[in-house]
Structures are given as structure tokens and as C-alpha cells.
Image: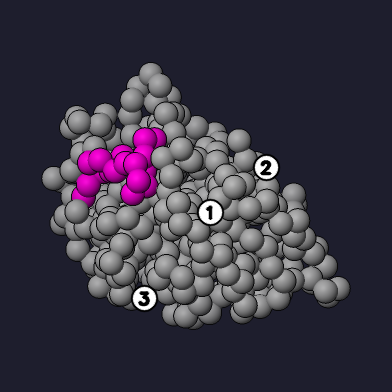
Amino acid sequence: MIVRSRRVRGVSVALAAVLGLASACSFGPPDPDQQGAPPNLPKPSTDASDGAPQQGEGSQEVAVTVLAKGLDVPWGMAFLPDGSALVTERDTARILKVGPGSDAEGLTVTEAQRLNEVQAAGDGGLLGVAVSPKYQTDKTIYVYYSTAKDNRVGKLVLGGRLTPILTGIPRSTEFNGGALAFGPDGLLYAGTGDGTPTGTQAQNPKSLGGKILRMTTAGKPAPGNPVKDSLVWSSGHHNVQGIAWDKTKRMYASESGQKKSGELNVIAKGKNYGWPKADGPGSDAKLTNPMFSWPVANSGCAGVATLEQTVATACLLGKRAYLLNVTGNGTVLGAPQEVLTGEYGRLRSMVAAPDGSLWVGTSNQEDEGDPAPDDDRIIRLVFSDGGAGRS
């Protein structure tokens, strides 16, 4: 394993980049004889006015391991019970299995299936993936994907036929959404895109565009939705590419592609998140303001993951990930920390792994990217304060 360590100023996290992956350490923190004893570094202060680490101040160390390379726009990631991850490639329509085995190059990557039903173009293609909570018995996975005329949610057993369970989600060149995950309630959630220049679908209760949808595994409206017989859980979204829940069952979602702001929202039943009436925080009491927002150039965030009190989001335009320290009542403490700024290019997917680390996927093989020889890559983050990578 080759280790390169350095302090990065201008962000609040110092990086120790681990460029190889020994076959004996596919999971878990780097071995002490390779990485050194973890430093005893302070956590972010809870008082931003009293010497708290701000953006560009303070430091925390994170071990960064490249788990896989040579991928083509990895989009969604979800874990199987054996610890391996299923990774979708947007443009090739491949479902890859990453791990749990490894070799000198990293985790083993094999093609599990290619979905011929997918028609990739623009930012549409094979997008989110979710593993059934009952996978041990039903072996079923769910995918969010584009056809020539719409976006869909479908289910399949790997190696078998893809069966659509929900069709008619608006399709466009840009802003197709694609987030897909099972919530703590066992129901399936999908984040969609508005897909129109004027935002006409986000505020239309009869349209599936610009929404977060909540459904059964048959693609039907879930019991308890805000409006009976409607799939809509929340509205007023522009482009939802990441959703996640913390240990209190609070739901978070990213918002990208707006004209002024990138957002991270706390999602609640029946709430309206403003697009196109609001772009970032606003004053309309009928609309829900974001938990946090950033200028577009620093964000364009997609994947979202939670870990202990941290909510993290991976950003495309900003070429970084943000870490927010969130209290039990949902208050953000201090300023978000920036990780990987400019280190690996565009970051899209992000998911919390079963071992407590974070996995992040780059998105440099698309038109807007500037790919390095190893791109695209999947990167693993382990924090020195014990927040990630614990056994």
C-alpha cells in the first residue's frame, strides 16, 4: 500500500490519501503500521462564535482509499448483505458488483448485468439503485432509469428481467432526478427532476416531476402519503439526486441545478420546497427553506449520506463534499466542513457503508468532466475521530 500524507489548507479537513489497497484491508481503518496511530484531533466546536473551525480553519484527518477505478460515470450505490456494493453506471447501463473480494488493484469489480431497456442521454440513463430490505429472501433490487420517453422505477433479480413498477416520470435532457432508497419505514422513495425551464411540474400536484415520491414495492402510493392515492411525499423540487435518513429517522435530500443555489433539505411529509418560486432561502411562509444552501459554483450536490451526527453531500460543480454537524433537533452546528476539494474532480454518488465508512463516486467521464487516467473512481473515507470505519 502506498501512502501519501499532507496537510491541506483552505479547507477544514487535512487529507491522508491512500492510493493503493492491500488485499488484507478491504474494509476497516488503515493498519497502524501503514497509516500511523490516528492523531487525537478535536471535533468541530459547537459554538461558531467561540473559535469554532470555520471553512479554511481547523483540521480533522481522513484516510482516503481508492477502492475501484476505471468506471464510467458511476451513479447509484447500494450494499448487499455480503458487504459488496451494487454500482450503476449511467451511460453504459451496467450494474456492477464491487467487492467484497480484492486484489492488488483494489476491490474486485464485475459486471452483474446490463439493462437493455435503458436509453441514456444527457443526464438520464441508469441512475439510482436500492436493495430490498428483504433481499435475503426475495433477492430483489430496484433501479431508477430512463427510457426514450420517460423515467421509470423497476425491479429485478440480478440476471433476470427488469420489470417496471412505476412509469411516466417526466424525462428531459437535464434534471431527471434519480435518487432511490428504502426508508426506515420499509417503503421506497424516489427523487425526481422537474425537467422544465420554468419549473411548471414541480408545483403541479398531478405531475410526478419535481417531487419526492413514496411508494410500495409494487409502485403504488404508500399508505399515509399526504394525499390518498397520490405518490407525492413532497413537492417543489428541481432535481433530487440524493436522499438519506439519520438515526432519528429524519430525511435529507439534495437539490441541484437551480440558477442561484444548491441546497440540502430536511424533508417532511407534504412540504413544498419552493422551486421555482424560491431558489435558496426565501420569505414565503408557505414554502420550506433549505437546511443549508451554497452558491451554485460551490455545490451542484448529488449524493447524500449520514453518519452519527454528520450529514454529508457530494458535489459535482463544487468538486468537493460537505460535512454538516447536525444536532438531534436538526440544528446545524458551526460551518460545514469541506472535504476532497479539487482532489478527485466531480463527486456524485455518496453512501454510508455497513462498516461505518463513506463511499464516494466520481463523475469525471461525462461531458462536463476532465477525467484523470484512473477515472472514474470509488473512494472510501475513514475519519480519524472514530466517526467512520469502525468495526
Which disc is residue 381 wearing?
Answer: 1
Q: In which image quadrant can residue 161 be found?
A: top left
Work out which quarter of the rendered image holds the C terminus and state it: top right
Residue wearing tag 2 = 248
Q: How far is mark 1 from mark 2, CA to CA?
A: 23 Å
Could you tell me if the residues under marks 1 and 2 are in contact, i.e. CB atoms within 8 Å?
no
Please determine whether, in this image, residue 27 is positioned above or below residue 147: above
**Residue under the image location 52 percent in, 50 percent down:** 358
Question: Which one is closest to the eye, mark 1 or mark 2?
Answer: 1
Inspect this view and state whether residue 263 appears: yes
Q: Residue at x 40, y 70 (%)?
A: 345
**Residue 255, numbered label:** none
Marked residue nearer the N-terminal end (2 or 3): 3
Amino acid type indicated by mark 1 = Leu
Instruction: Tell me which segment is drawn in magenta.
Output: 93-111
Residue at disc 2, secondary structure: loop
The one nearer the camera, 363 or 150, is 363
